[in-house]
Amino acid sequence: MNTIRVQLNGKEADVPGGLTVRGLLETLELEPGLVVVERNLEILSRTRYDEIPVREGDTLELVHFVGGG
Amino acid sequence: MSRTKIHDVTVEAPPQLVREQDDEPLVIAGREFNSRLIVGTGKYADDEVMIAAIRASGAEMVTVAVRRVDLARREGILHVLDPHEFFLLPNTAGCFTAEEAMRYARLGHAAGFNDWVKLEVIGDRDTLLPDTQATVEAARLLATEGFKVMAYTNDDLITALRLEEAGCAAVMPLASPIGSGLGVVNPYFIREIKRRLSVPVIVDAGVGTASDACITMEQGVDGVLMNTALAAAEDPVAMAHAMRHAVRAGRLAYRAGRMPAREIAVPSSPSRGMLD
């Protein structure tokens, strides 16, 4: 399977090629409704997760809410 | 020696959640809150205790932080905290510049719940005191973008005025440094900020125990925000219960109007009518 290299939450990661953002979240077993994705410093709207491809060299930040004061 | 824990008994929800007839609701940016206590969700050892403590506190608004997903663990706070039960206030804790805080605010907004943010721009790692200049700058830009900004700041009146002018929905001076539990170190400045601002003043950080919360509310402020005082208590649920009453007691005492303090004794019983 061909993989592409991305920067994922601060670390180099090899992920399957040809995935959309939604596909990537599913691969990582994350619920799209609970995660916010920032790609190359742009926050992605959830309605576009199905259409936006993950590309070689992308810098992806997957964030969510944690406990805080 | 065993200690009776309040969460071993049922902590009842207050009847018809607290539109207390003798107080108005807290209103921030046009939204009504029936509790004047806002609580954080950090540093709890246990999720169940956290949820029980938040419920016992009676708080409606709870703060959350934005962080990278731990890809090995995956679960965030929304796996245990129901966003329909509480009003989520995303924070920018841990940010040291205006730009960074704005990035976190936008990420919190993209989570899809509301356009509110607890703005926090830290200026010093040791004291966690705010960078007030950067806070004002970020507040102005975020307010322009449509955010309801609740800004953490120090107990400086001038900064508080600048934050109000920048468009903040609420200004949140500290009682004392974050996580210190030292209580209100400068009640005079807190009163002065409250006296001069039109937007709600919420005291954020530094409350350690119930008397601190009560004294804070007695200064006339609109609310209190706390996290460590509950999370680091031996029994967070019992402390949350105490805080709910302390905030309410302080609020009612403020509204009641306290007697003047004086440094001489004045007898409470009549001096006339004593026997010869």
Image: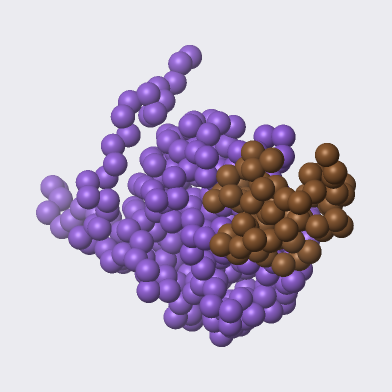
Chain colours: A brown, B purple
Determine the image quadrant of residue B123: bottom right
Determine the image quadrant of residue B176: bottom right
Count the labels in the image: 0
From the top left corner, tell me how far across and down residue A34 is, in percent. 56, 49
> In the picture provided, is B77 more to the left or to the right than A17?
left
Task: Please name whichever residue, B259 or B171, is drawn nearer the observer in this view of the structure.
Answer: B171
* Residue drawn at 41 percent across, 25 percent down: B5
Q: Is residue B175 visible?
A: no
* Residue drawn at 76 percent across, 51 percent down: A18
* Residue drawn at 28 percent across, 37 percent down: B12
From the top left corner, tell me how far across and down residue B245 is, in percent. 35, 47
Q: Is residue A26 visible?
A: yes
From the top left corner, tell me how far across and down residue B141 is, in percent. 64, 80
Task: Please name whichever residue, A46 or B138, is drawn nearer the observer in this view of the structure.
Answer: A46
Question: Compared to B3, does A7 lie above or below?
Answer: below
Task: Please name whichever residue, B41 or B66, is drawn nearer the observer in this view of the structure.
Answer: B66
> In the picture provided, is B229 more to the left or to the right than A53?
left
Question: Compared to B13, does B95 lie above or below?
Answer: below
Q: Residue furthest front?
A: A1
Q: Residue furthest bottom?
A: B165
Determine the image quadrant of residue B137: bottom right
Task: Please name whichever residue, B55 or A2, is drawn nearer the observer in this view of the structure.
Answer: A2
From the top left corner, tell me how far across and down residue B261 is, in percent. 40, 63
* Residue drawn at 61 percent across, 38 percent down: B75
> In the picture provided, is A25 more to the left or to the right than A10?
left
